[in-house]
Each structure stands twice: as C-alpha cells, then as structure tokens.
Image (spheres, rainbow, N blue to C red):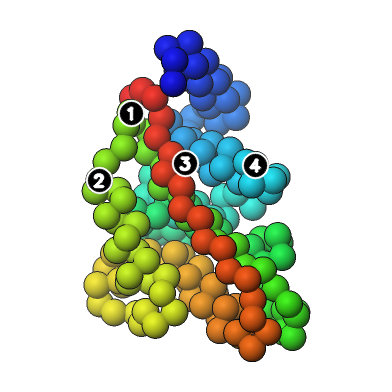
Amino acid sequence: MSEDDRLILSNLISQEHQKSAPTMPLDDFFEIFSAEQILKSRSLDMGPDEIASGIMGQGHAKKGTPHAGPDGGVDSFYVFVNRRLIREDTDLSALKDQQITIDVVVIQSKNSPGFSEAAVDKLAKFVELCLRLSATPAPESIALYKPALRDAVEKFHLILKGALTSKPTLNIAFYYASSIHR
C-alpha cells in the first residue's frame, strides 16, 4: 500500500469515527467499520443494528451485556442463509426442507499496524474448539469464548445439521483486518 493510500485510509477512518460515533473508543469503532466494509465487499449491505448483532470483540462489549467476556480472537461472527442474516431471534423452522446456502463470515479486527501470528493461531483454535460440527462445549471453549459467540456458533450448527439431508452449500470466510496506524 502506498503512503498516499495509507494517508487516505487513515483519514477516512478518522472522519467516519468522528461523524458516526465520536464518543466511542476508536478500537470499538474499528471493529464495526471493518465488519461493515468486509460485508459490503461481499455485497451484503447491512444496517447498523445488523452489523452490531455480529460484533463479538472484547472492545465492543460492556460489562453485564450479552457480549461481555473473552472473544478468543473472533471480533465479528455472521451466519447467512441464502444471503439472509441469521440472528439470535431468527426462526429456523422456516428453513426446513429448503435447498440452502450457508455463509459464515468470521472477522478478526485489530486497530494496530500489521498482522500477528497469534491472531491467526486464535482463529485456528476457534475452528478446532467451536466451528467443527463435532466440537462439543468443553471447559476450554467455555472459558475462551463469550456466551454470545457460543450461541451464534450453536445456531450455525443447528442450521447445518438440520439441512444435511438436502446437501447445503457451505462457505466459510475468515478475514483479518488491521488498521494502518495506532
């Protein structure tokens, strides 16, 4: 990325932060901003509430909220069925006996320059402990992942297991977003 591109991106993030959520800590805003941009790149133009529903990062959580607790390296987690966002209150019975495409989007957002191997290792551990269909809630996964993330993964498992006889298409995308400055 050229210096001009870095400057433009840095200014864009700062301006959007000031315009949209000036009192929100920049780390929290970057989680939302990066999720919005990633979802747009997948032609999923979602509103603020829909984007917020998938934010799992520690920075975004406040004590006592359903998002509170460790994020285990998963800052955002979204499940879509036939391009429709699945949320905690989505009625899964409407999907019965349909041919479906399931898209899972997992995002790690870091408001820091560069990338780290540790973040990638955390995502690999998340796949092993939670995302695999054979994964079972174990003390380690309960300690590493907040209830909102575990619930979202459980909903994904329910959808996939319920659709196996109709041979669903499954796409899982991992994104690691990093800002250009701190």
Q: Residue at x 52, y 61 (%)?
A: 172
- Give how far apart the Cα atoms at labels 1 and 3 are: 14 Å
Instruction: Inspect this view and state whether residue 132 appears.
Output: yes
- Above or below, 40 against 139 in this view is above
Q: Residue at x 29, y 79 (%)?
A: 138
Q: Earlier in the sequence, mark 3 or mark 2?
A: 3
Image position, residue 7 (x, y; %): 46, 13
Q: Which mark is residue 40?
A: 4
Q: Earlier in the sequence, mark 1 or mark 4?
A: 4
Q: Earlier in the sequence, mark 4 or mark 2?
A: 4
Image position, residue 34 (x, y; %): 51, 38
Q: Earlier in the sequence, mark 1 or mark 3?
A: 3
Instruction: Inspect this view and state whether residue 79 appears.
Output: no
Judging by the rendered image, the residue that carries numbered circle 2 is 117
Q: Secondary structure at mark 2?
A: helix
Judging by the rendered image, the residue that carries numbered circle 3 is 31
Q: Which mark is residue 113?
A: 1
Quadrant in which the C terminus is drawn: top left
Q: Earlier in the sequence, mark 4 or mark 3?
A: 3
- Above or below, 33 against 180 in this view is below
